[in-house]
Amino acid sequence: MDVNLNAPHSMGTTIIGITYDGGVVLGADSRTST
């Protein structure tokens, strides 16, 4: 596999928080792609 570490890449992170009567729910997703 030929990997070019200098190639442009995209990093995305999504974080969501939801509050409700019983507490808080947090979720996160991160991704790196070239």
Image (cartoon, helix red, strand yellow):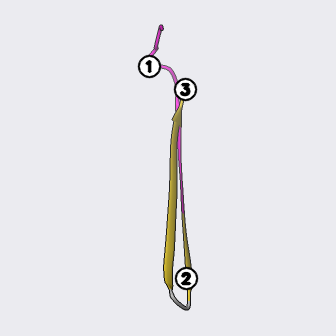
**Could you tell me the amino acid type at mark 2?**
Thr
Disc 2 on helix, strand or loop? strand
Residue 1 screen position, x and y as percent: 48, 8
Q: Residue at x 51, y 74 (%)?
A: 25
**Could you tell me the amino acid type at mark 3?**
Thr
Task: Please give the range of residues in magenta.
Answer: 1-15
The crowding category of the residue bearing disc 1, from other C-alpha atoms within 10 Å (few below 14, some 14 to 19, many at least 20), is few
Instruction: Specify the quadrant of the image occupied by residue 19.
Output: bottom right
Q: Quadrant of the C terminus?
A: top right
Above or below for 29 versus 7 = below
Q: CA distance from mark 2 to mark 3?
A: 35 Å
Name the front one of labels 3 and 1: 3
The residue to which callout 2 is attached is 19
Most foreground residue, 8 or 28 = 28
Disc 1 on helix, strand or loop? loop
Above or below for 8 versus 12 = above
Residue 12 screen position, x and y as percent: 54, 45
**Earlier residue among tags 2 and 1:** 1
Dots 3, 1 in contact, CB < 8 A:
no
Q: CA distance from mark 3 to mark 1?
A: 10 Å
The residue to which callout 1 is attached is 6
Q: Is 3 left, or right, of 16 in this rendering?
A: left
Q: Which mark is residue 34?
A: 3
Q: Residue at x 51, y 88 (%)?
A: 22
Instruction: Specify the quadrant of the image occupied by residue 5.
Output: top left
Disc 3 on helix, strand or loop? loop
